[in-house]
Image (tube, rainbow, N blue to C red):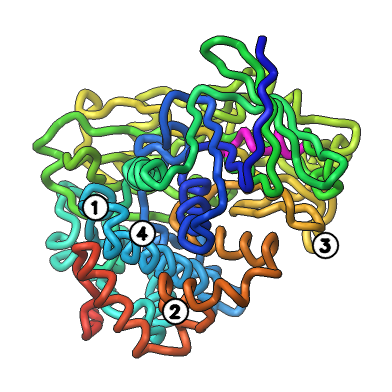
């Protein structure tokens, strides 16, 4: 067993979209820093970033109803939607920069134009959708959105959903053509290919077993080569833990105070995938519905056109599943192993609070294929069982922590960066809209962990991300300019200049 030691400036744990994005940013900002990546699987983008393990929605809040909250007075709060859309615009700018500088090629292999739609049924929901449409339409980020409750118009937009629909319940939808489908697996692999060509040391089949602080404030990692069992020690001044669901146990091993009152709750996703090309050909959009009352935000039903390996696919879901694993390739003891004396209170409080979620997950796990088909038929009335197969998607670990608003053991739906006081170690926890907002999330991480460099980095950051430091919603001209230039570079259809209402 060798005990090799080596030193590097930055260590990235996990070869997913987050490490890929942080690595790409750092390589541009400080090309001479030495970066090492450890990934326990055999290649990049195999877990949460894999194209079959996430919904591939370029999350821009164009269709996801859970990002626009209805207030008690009936008004619609669009602040979260605006923030998420702005974050996606930041991602588009950085990807365009990488394409223009020839670091990644053939953007159509990871991003495609695809209409994003919201669809609801029932008087109350139709009224909400119309108010949501009116609230968003006034914002330049959502320019080009259309609303219709006319069945003839809807038949043009979503023939597969409208065909053979027997219900007389009112139905309405919004549609915006500037939505996208993103293959985050392909993007992750492209980014790692680019990093490799710039001498980033990427070690696959290497598992990080332990992390501890050394006397001089840097971090020492105990890394095991999975193929031959040999153990190496690697030290770095800065460590990023981007291992998806596997991040929490590693963060706990670091022993930093910020890791103490945090827990994780794993939720797995299942999708129905259409195996009939004739059915696949009849649908061309991502259509998001409303989550059933009492269901968690990650369970919003959607019928998605996807482009995977340049082939059109059709998926419906997600159905929630439960497994105690923190990663698809994880261990059955992950959840139990993450409960420590210092987060036990937080976890127990979350358990008491999350009875409804637990009950929901148990019901979901028990669903038969026929029951799932019934849910699908809310979207596709004439769906046939033999045309659809079940696919197990990725594991997500929702963050549990004590918050001022929610009290002890509050379940967080979202993405969170946890770092220590001196910014020498950071971990990314949580789930959706994760990958779509990777660039914004990593820019926040840079601010938190490298405040002393930000001033010197600013000109380069503005070159890569023209809207850096600017509030996009306040600058409609800049929005159009960025939309046009990134659409051109990435081969997408831009925004339409007019928006219309069809009553």
Residue 366 appears in the picture as rendered = no
**Is residue 157 on the magenta stretch?**
no
Q: Which stretch appears magenta?
A: 243-252
Residue at horizontal 63 percent and vertical 20 percent from the top:
224
Disc 1: which residue: 105
Label 2 element class: loop
Label located before the other in sequence (3 or 4): 4
Note whether 327 is above or below 314 in the view shown: above
Distance between the alpha carbons at the discs numbered 3 and 4: 36 Å
The answer to whether marks 1 and 4 mark residues whose Cβ atoms lie closer than 8 Å is no
Residue to which mark 3 is pinned: 404
Q: Can you say which quadrant of the picture contains the C terminus?
A: bottom left
Mark 1 vs mark 4: which is more N-terminal?
A: 1
The answer, for residue 250, to whether it is visible in the render is yes
- Front label number (4 vs 2): 2
From mark 4 to mark 2, how far is it between C-alphas?
38 Å
Residue 307, above or below 234 = below
| Quadrant where the image shows the N terminus | top right
Which image quadrant is residue 135 in?
bottom left
Give residue 31's position: percent from left, percent from top.
Answer: 49, 57
Single out the mark in the foreground, 1 or 4: 1
Which residue was labeled with disc 2? Answer: 467
């Amino acid at each position: 067993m060798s005990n090799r030691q080596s030193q590097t400036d930055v260590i990235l744990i996990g070869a997913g979209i987050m490490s890929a994005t942080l690595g790409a940013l750092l390589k541009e900002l400080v090309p001479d820093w030495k970066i090492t990546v450890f990934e326990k699987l055999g290649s990049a983008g195999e877990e949460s970033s894999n194209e079959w393990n996430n919904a591939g929605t370029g999350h821009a809040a164009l269709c996801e109803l859970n990002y626009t909250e209805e207030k008690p007075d009936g008004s619609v709060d669009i602040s979260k939607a605006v923030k998420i859309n702005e974050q996606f615009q930041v991602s588009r700018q950085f990807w365009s920069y990488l394409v223009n500088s020839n670091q990644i090629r053939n953007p159509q292999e990871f991003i495609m134009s695809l209409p994003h739609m919201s669809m609801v049924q029932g008087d109350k929901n139709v009224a909400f959708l119309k108010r949501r449409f009116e609230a968003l339409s006034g914002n330049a980020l959502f320019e080009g959105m259309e609303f219709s409750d006319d069945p003839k118009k809807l038949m043009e937009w979503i023939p597969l959903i409208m065909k053979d629909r027997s219900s007389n319940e009112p139905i309405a939808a919004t549609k915006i053509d500037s939505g996208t489908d993103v293959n985050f697996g392909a993007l992750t692999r492209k980014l790692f290919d680019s990093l490799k060509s710039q001498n980033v040391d990427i070690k696959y089949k290497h598992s990080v077993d332990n992390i501890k602080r050394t006397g001089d404030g840097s971090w020492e990692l105990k890394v095991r080569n999975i193929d031959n069992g040999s153990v190496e020690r690697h030290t770095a001044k800065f460590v990023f833990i981007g291992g998806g669901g596997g991040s929490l146990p590693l963060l706990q091993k670091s022993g930093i105070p910020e890791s103490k009152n945090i827990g994780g709750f794993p939720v797995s996703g299942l999708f129905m995938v259409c195996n009939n090309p004739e059915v696949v050909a009849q649908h061309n959009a991502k259509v998001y519905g409303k989550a059933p009352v009492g269901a968690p935000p990650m369970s919003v039903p959607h019928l998605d056109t996807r482009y995977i390996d340049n082939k059109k696919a059709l998926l419906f879901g997600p159905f929630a599943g439960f497994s105690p694993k923190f990663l698809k390739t994880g261990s059955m003891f992950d959840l139990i192993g993450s409960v420590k004396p210092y987060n036990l209170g937080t976890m127990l409080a979350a358990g008491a609070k999350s009875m409804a979620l637990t009950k929901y997950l148990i019901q979901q796990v028990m669903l038969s294929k026929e029951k799932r088909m019934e849910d699908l038929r809310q979207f596709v009335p004439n769906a046939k069982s033999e045309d659809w197969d079940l696919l197990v998607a990725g594991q997500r670990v929702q963050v549990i922590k004590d918050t001022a608003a929610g009290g002890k053991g509050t379940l967080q739906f979202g993405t969170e960066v946890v770092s220590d006081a001196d910014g020498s170690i950071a971990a990314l926890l949580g789930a959706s809209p994760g990958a779509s907002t990777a660039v914004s999330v990593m820019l926040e991480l840079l601010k938190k962990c490298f405040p002393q460099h930000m001033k010197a980095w600013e000109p380069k950051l503005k070159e890569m991300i023209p809207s850096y430091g600017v509030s996009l919603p306040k600058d409609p001209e800049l929005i159009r300019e960025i939309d046009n230039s990134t659409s051109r570079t990435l081969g997408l259809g831009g925004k339409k200049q007019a928006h219309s209402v069809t009553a």
